[in-house]
Amino acid sequence: MIAFAANSVLARLALGADEIGAIGYTGVRLAAGAAVLLTLLAWRAARNHSSHFAIDGSWFGAAALVCYALAFSIAYLMLGAGTGALILFASVQIGMVSWAILKGDRPGPPELLGMGIAFAALIYLVSPGLVAPSPFGALLMAAAGLSWAAYSLIGRGSRSPLADTAGNFIRCFPLALGLIAVGVLTHAPSAVGVAYGVASGAVASGLGYALWYSALPDLSRTRAALVQLTVPAIAAVAGALIIGEPLTARLIISSAGVLGGIAFAVIASQRRKARARS
């Protein structure tokens, strides 16, 4: 979760200070992730005394990854680290719950109440006011969250997290090079901006996602969802300490409503399913 929160902080450090453009940053992040994951696959094959290694994943996973990364970068031109992370992970949970409903799951009143509280708190966060976030930035981050929800659903049940994550990133590599080229032409990056992008792609994204998918089989769906709710809080605190972003009353109240509502809904869902099985 620290790696996920680091993505928000690194994006704000790079984009908020205008060290690199959003398009170039996305390209560097995806390319760095592909490079480090390919290196890990080669290292694992060498350790197992094999000259071959599998690159799995899918084009659908790669497409969802690109949509997430690009919308995420552009949104962070306009949003603070904590606000962006809150909108992102709220949208992820809303997207995954919506998919479950479309697949036939019927949430009970407690779950609907929890999601209603979360949605109302999210509306409060983006409602007009002196400290309201950019509406366009919030919309883009919501799109990033829905793309990440799709990426998570595509990768659910992965039997080879490293190979799947690497395959998705490697499929993005040609596009990443194109994004880097466009970024250099439209907004020449600084060395610091490139370094932030590499750190985000290689460590916080590539390694972070591989570790997350490795941990998922040992976590229940409820625990996995609840653990992810720590990311906005980590990002908000890190944004305040590292970047100097203010922890506004609106952000604190909205965070309590969004995270509390989602946690209530997730726990209620788990209890309903447990009763149905018994």
Image (cartoon, rainbow, N blue to C red):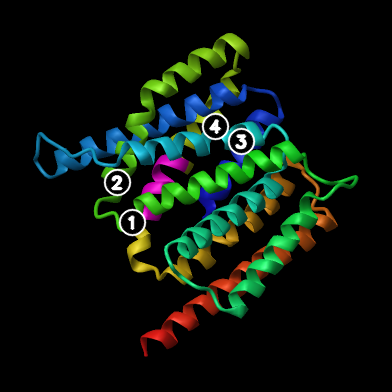
Q: Nearer the viewer, mark 4 or mark 3?
A: 4
Three-letter code for the amino acid on which mark 1 is drawn: Ser
Q: CA distance from mark 1 to mark 3?
A: 25 Å
Left or right: residue 16 compared with residue 35: right
Marks 1 & 2, CB-CB < 8 Å contact: yes
Q: Nearer the viewer, mark 1 or mark 4?
A: 4
Task: Give whichever of discs 1 and 3 has the lower sequence position.
Answer: 3
Which image quarter: residue 265?
bottom right
As helix, strand or loop, the secondary structure at mark 4 comes to helix
Residue ID at (75%, 61%):
121
Q: CA distance from mark 4 to mark 3?
A: 11 Å
Q: Residues within 10 Å of mark 1 (few under 14, many from 20)?
A: some
Q: CA distance from mark 2 to mark 4?
A: 22 Å
Check the image and report above or below for 93 versus 198.
Answer: below
Q: Residues within 10 Å of mark 2 (few under 14, many from 20)?
A: many
- Would residue 272 be visible to someone looking at this image? yes
The residue at which mark 3 appears reads as: 11
Q: Which mark is residue 162?
A: 2
Three-letter code for the amino acid on which mark 2 is drawn: Leu
The residue at which mark 4 appears reads as: 70
As helix, strand or loop, the secondary structure at mark 2 comes to helix
The residue at which mark 1 appears reads as: 214
| Residue at far bottom of view | 278
Numbered range of the magenta stretch: 205-213
